[in-house]
Amino acid sequence: MSPTGLPVILLVPGAFGTPEGFGPLLPYLSEADYVTHPGPYPSCNPVDPATTTCEKDIAFLRDNVLLPLLEQQKDVVVLAHSYGGVVAGGAVKNLDKQTREAEGHATGVVGLIYIAGNITLENESLSQAVGGSHPPFIKIDKPSKGLAVIEPAMEVLYSDCDPALGSEFAKHMNPHSLLAFATPATAPGWADKAFDGRRAYIRTLKDCCNPSWLQDSWLEKSKVQWDVIDFETGHMPFVSQPKALAATIVRLANAFKTS
Ligand SMILES: *[C@@H]1O[C@H](CO)[C@@H](O)[C@H](O)[C@H]1NC(C)=O
Ligand SMILES: *[C@@H]1O[C@H](CO)[C@@H](O)[C@H](O)[C@H]1NC(C)=O
């Protein structure tokens, strides 16, 4: 537990993004006494894109970020955006509180909050989950072989944000490894019964990157129950509506803590 007894909120960014991209949420979360922790993974801006598989992202987040946090006697709520949902889903497998307690540990992952999260099943890659080909705004082999960027980022990702802040947003965008999208994910933890009542999905209704019908199809495919909360935003509600989103996150995290 943190000094306040509240779980730590782990910030798992989408592809092309960094944990710092969640920045606008932080003042509102800390106002509610929540502490956050960055949840990066290696396929973003990789040294060598030829080795950064989805499975390695999952293993990294689990072994280098989640387990160390849990071992510091902290319960964790995972906040995952977009492709971060694929990575976090695999990483939380068997780290739920029930499984951890059965193994003699005091702490665990107490809740999952997906924001327009991409959902993959066991052994399914992100490319397969989106229908086999990349959407046209994912520019392949740019800026170099094995990497991709999103263009135009402002229109696709920040469609409802202040255009004057475009250069500020660009600082949080990085090239991403294509291999991470093409390689299969491991079995997702969200599928487990221990997360019943502990899964929330922020559906972004005006999303130009992950259209809401695609989000619906992923939710359906997951075959488990999510608490779905609609936001009338584009793909980055933590930038366009940070205050309202933070209030939702606090409400959900409080409920996960006490349930
Ligand atoms: C998730 O899937 C959508 C839908 O095709 C895709 O456009 C988007 O890039 C994916 N999210 C990422 C890469 O984080
Ligand atoms: C995923 O792949 C592994 C290894 O090939 C296999 O053992 C497992 O049964 C597969 N799972 C599903 C759900 O297809």
Image (tube, grey):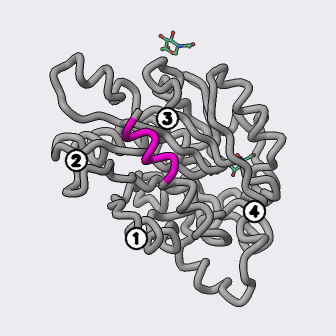
Q: Which residue is mark 2?
A: 1
Q: Residue 240 is drawn in which quadrant? A: bottom right
Q: Residues within 10 Å of mark 1 (few under 14, many from 20)?
A: few
From the viewer's perspective, is residue 223 above or below residue 130? above
Q: Provide residue 12's location: percent of width, then percent of height.
A: 46, 53
Q: Residue at x 52, y 74 (%)?
A: 24
Q: CA distance from mark 1 to mark 3?
A: 28 Å
Q: Are marks 2 and 4 in contact (CB under 8 Å)?
A: no
Q: Tell me, yes or no, if residue 51 can be seen here.
A: no
Q: Tell me, yes or no, if residue 12 can be seen here.
A: yes
Q: Chief secondary structure of the magenta span?
A: helix
- SS label for mark 2: loop
Which tag is nearer the camera, tag 1 or tag 4? 1
**Which numbered disc flags the more N-terminal residue, 1 or 2?**
2
**Is the C-beta of the residue carrying label 3 under 8 Å from the nearest atom of ligand 1?**
no
| Residue 117 within the magenta-colored segment of the rendering | no
Q: CA distance from mark 2 to mark 4?
A: 33 Å
